[in-house]
């Protein structure tokens, strides 16, 4: 009877619990919350430091630069974000007299930025002021923070209006070398006085190490305040890409209160810093972050009136915008009140939870590709019948990105610019069968790269002209990879016949650093070893976590490694600067984006000539020369240009790929009622195993019970 009662209780509990294995409570699932995941802890939320796509997805929804991209218009279009209008630009000669943009006398570009009034920061304790106007929560001690785990544990919170000085303060922070801004060495070449200011403020920061450094008293010659809502920036010469940079998080405003508040030693000791708890004016704020469990964004209650884009019929047609993306035109955003990211270290649980409806969107791993996608006889990809039956939608686009395998050009074996070093890298490049990689590991979601510049970016070449002659031959109208025999011939010329060093007589051993250490990555690492083994080269895999991996690359300690780059803005400079010598990771002490530490003087000279030019036939010819130099030097195995594919559920609306911007969460929406309905349909409790679990022992025990009863009756009769 007890077992029967327990069975009855479990069945009732299962019915009322609705779904046994749901990772979220029903209250959350029925709320206006977006559910997603992350697989590795985040390292930087400080916008001056962060240069990672995965971090940008978070902080771009917290911080607001002066300009941003329209969510729907294509080609990608910059528009005011916190500005009243797009910046005014005038061009000046050496005497600061205004001249025509096309004039050869242009020495300076003068930008004027005028902010909207009434933009407020999120609520935060740093904005609480004392009677003198200073920070109320200053001079905090360890004892003060005993019950404080994040900024929102403080009793008092406040806000203030966004001011022009906040954008200037961000540039000043960028100039402090100790903050390790990855773009300082690029930007200091343009902003008047920034290089000089950086040297001065870096020295001051070094001298005052351990003390709180207030940057307000220090000024940059080319960055000035006009009034509370207006500031100007003066550039050397013309640099058309500058507004693209101004759309990036590096130039997001930093309130002085937040910087000084977070510099307190007691807060730093508890890892409560600008790097872990950002302070912005965006649609969301970071309410919770536990790197071992969850990250939570919450709608900023102080967010101003911002509206979903409105397009004319002609604009929608030109941008190929479907009607369903225009239904919310003119409505106030954000639509979603919270975004929850749960830690998921493996891809299979993420995929299964997506199919159950517990995650609202998902990428498509190689193991799930056949289940999600079907390819017709013409090679076109579409959703499988099972996905369509669940109302799942496919979102795909060619990414302005490149994935590559990098050689550390400072390494004594694979680096250098001698003929033998070039031939070694060229041989390895030929042996890396990227076509096979794309087929096996990405399910044809990409095309082999021939240069640093991906499709859709000016300077990308198609056909025979775009084919890399050091790795491919042009045969029958197609780019075909050179034979492994040709690779072996180059390897022998490099001094390693059959992978054996002529100098030492020993086999060539190379080291590949990677973050791919999970069980899902074993096949990829085996494939990578095989590519080198074709040349007789032994490849040693050195697995590590992402943060350690970054440190090794930044310090030039890695020999070979895979890396990727997604366009910050739609211009070839944003890819070619990955190979510009002055951006080398080591020479900039980890701040540069040239992770291969490539440094060819002729390439550098052409880059400096090309970078500030408008797109033109003249610029294209320079780019062609640069690409040819890089192809011959082979600092990268060029890898592939990826095609992104993502799946979303029918209740996740207003989703469209946007390669240039990550501040798109405010435009998305969730139909929570439909989500819960589908979850209940797809996750009905399976009671049969439980029933059998209890019923089979009962059936097995019944004959024994009857025998026992009969035996008892016999005993009673005998006693009588």
Image (cartoon, helix red, strand yellow):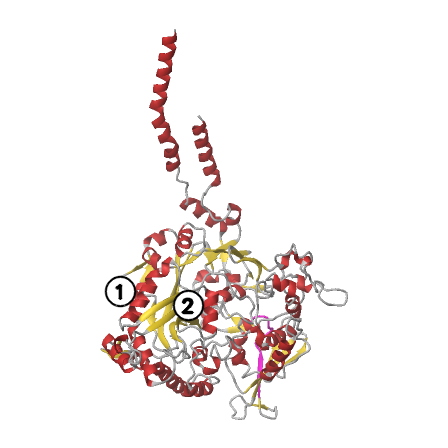
Q: Which of 184 and 431 lies nearest the eye of the viewer?
A: 431
Q: Position of residue 147 (x, y in %)?
A: 65, 54
* Circle number at residue 320: 2
Q: Residue 329: in sight, yes or no?
A: yes
Image: magenta residue range = 80-91
Q: Position of residue 66 (x, y in %)?
A: 57, 73
**501 on left or right of 302:** left
Q: Residue 111: in sight, yes or no?
A: no
Q: Is residue 485 magenta?
A: no
Q: Quadrant of residue 75?
A: bottom left
Q: Which of 29 and 675 lies nearest the eye of the viewer?
A: 29
Q: Is residue 245 above or below residue 514?
A: below
Q: Is residue 162 above or below residue 369?
A: below
Q: Which of 171 and 238 lies nearest the eye of the viewer?
A: 171
Under circle 2, the secondary element is loop
Label 2 or label 1, whichever comes before in sequence order: 2
Q: Is residue 329 above or below residue 587?
A: above
Under circle 1, the secondary element is loop
Q: Position of residue 431 (x, y in %)?
A: 29, 73
Q: Residue at x 45, y 27 (%)?
A: 2
Which image quadrant: the C terminus?
Answer: top left
Q: Quadrant of residue 250?
A: bottom right
* Residue highlighted by disc 1: 378
């Amino acid at each position: 009877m007890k077992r029967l009662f327990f069975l009855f209780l479990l069945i009732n509990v299962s019915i009322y619990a609705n779904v046994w294995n749901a990772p979220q409570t029903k209250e959350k699932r029925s709320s206006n919350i977006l559910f997603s995941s992350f697989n590795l802890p985040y390292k930087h939320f400080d916008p001056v430091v962060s240069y990672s796509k995965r971090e940008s997805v978070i902080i771009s929804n917290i911080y607001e630069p002066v300009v941003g991209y329209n969510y729907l218009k294509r080609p990608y279009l910059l528009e005011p974000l916190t500005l009243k209008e797009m910046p005014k630009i005038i061009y000046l000669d050496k005497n600061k007299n205004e001249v025509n943009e096309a004039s050869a006398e242009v020495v300076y570009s003068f930008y004027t930025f005028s902010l909207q009034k009434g933009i407020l920061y999120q609520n935060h304790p740093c904005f609480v002021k004392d009677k003198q106007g200073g920070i109320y929560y200053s001079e905090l001690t360890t004892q003060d923070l005993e019950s404080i785990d994040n900024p929102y544990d403080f009793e008092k919170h406040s806000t203030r209006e966004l001011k022009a000085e906040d954008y200037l303060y961000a540039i000043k922070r960028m100039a402090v070398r100790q903050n390790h801004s990855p773009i300082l060495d690029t930007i200091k070449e343009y902003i008047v006085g920034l290089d000089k200011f950086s040297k001065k403020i870096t020295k001051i920061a070094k001298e005052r190490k351990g003390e709180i450094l207030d940057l307000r008293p220090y000024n940059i010659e080319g960055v000035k305040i006009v009034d509370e809502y207006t500031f100007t920036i003066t550039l050397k010469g013309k640099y058309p890409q500058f507004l693209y940079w101004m759309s990036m998080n590096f130039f997001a405003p930093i309130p002085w209160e937040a910087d000084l508040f977070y510099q307190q030693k007691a807060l730093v000791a508890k890892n409560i810093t600008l790097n872990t708890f950002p302070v912005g004016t965006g649609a969301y704020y970071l309410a919770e972050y536990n790197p071992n469990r969850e990250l939570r964004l919450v709608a900023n209650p102080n967010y101003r009136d911002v509206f979903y884009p409105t397009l004319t019929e002609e604009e929608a047609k030109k941008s190929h915008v479907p009607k369903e993306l225009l239904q919310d035109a003119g409505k106030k955003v954000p639509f979603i009140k919270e975004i929850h990211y749960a830690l998921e270290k493996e891809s299979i649980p993420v995929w299964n939870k997506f199919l159950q409806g517990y995650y609202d969107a998902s990428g498509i791993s190689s193991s799930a590709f056949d289940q999600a996608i079907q390819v017709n006889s013409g090679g076109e990809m579409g959703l499988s019948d099972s996905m369509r039956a669940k109302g799942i939608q496919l979102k795909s686009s060619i990414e302005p990105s490149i994935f590559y395998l990098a050689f550390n050009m400072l390494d004594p074996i694979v680096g250098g610019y001698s003929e033998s070093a070039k031939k070694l890298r060229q041989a390895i490049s030929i042996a890396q069968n990227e076509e096979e990689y794309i087929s096996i590991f990405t399910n044809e979601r990409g095309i082999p790269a021939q240069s640093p510049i991906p499709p859709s970016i000016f300077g990308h070449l198609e056909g025979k002209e775009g084919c890399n002659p050091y790795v491919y031959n042009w045969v029958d109208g197609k780019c075909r990879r050179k034979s492994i025999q040709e690779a072996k011939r180059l390897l022998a010329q490099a001094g390693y016949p059959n992978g054996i060093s002529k100098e030492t007589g020993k086999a060539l051993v190379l080291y590949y650093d990677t973050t791919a250490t999970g069980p899902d990555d074993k096949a990829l690492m085996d494939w990578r070893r095989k590519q080198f083994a074709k040349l007789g080269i032994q490849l040693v895999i050195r697995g590590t976590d992402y943060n350690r991996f970054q440190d090794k690359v930044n310090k030039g300690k890695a020999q070979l490694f895979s890396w990727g780059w997604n366009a910050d803005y739609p211009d070839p400079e944003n890819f070619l600067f990955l190979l510009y010598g002055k951006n080398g990771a080591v020479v900039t002490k980890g701040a540069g984006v040239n992770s291969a530490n490539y440094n060819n003087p002729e390439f550098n000279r052409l880059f400096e000539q090309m970078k500030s030019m408008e797109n033109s036939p003249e610029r294209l010819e320079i780019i062609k020369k640069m690409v040819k130099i890089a192809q011959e030097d082979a600092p990268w195995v060029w890898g592939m240009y990826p095609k992104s594919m993502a799946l979303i559920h029918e209740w996740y609306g207003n989703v469209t790929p946007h390669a240039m911007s990550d501040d798109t969460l405010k435009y998305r929406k969730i139909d929570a009622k439909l989500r819960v309905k589908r979850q209940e349909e797809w996750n009905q409790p399976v009671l049969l195993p439980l029933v059998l679990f209890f019923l089979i022992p009962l059936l097995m025990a019944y004959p024994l019970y009857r025998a026992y009863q009969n035996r008892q009756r016999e005993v009673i009769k005998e006693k009588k």
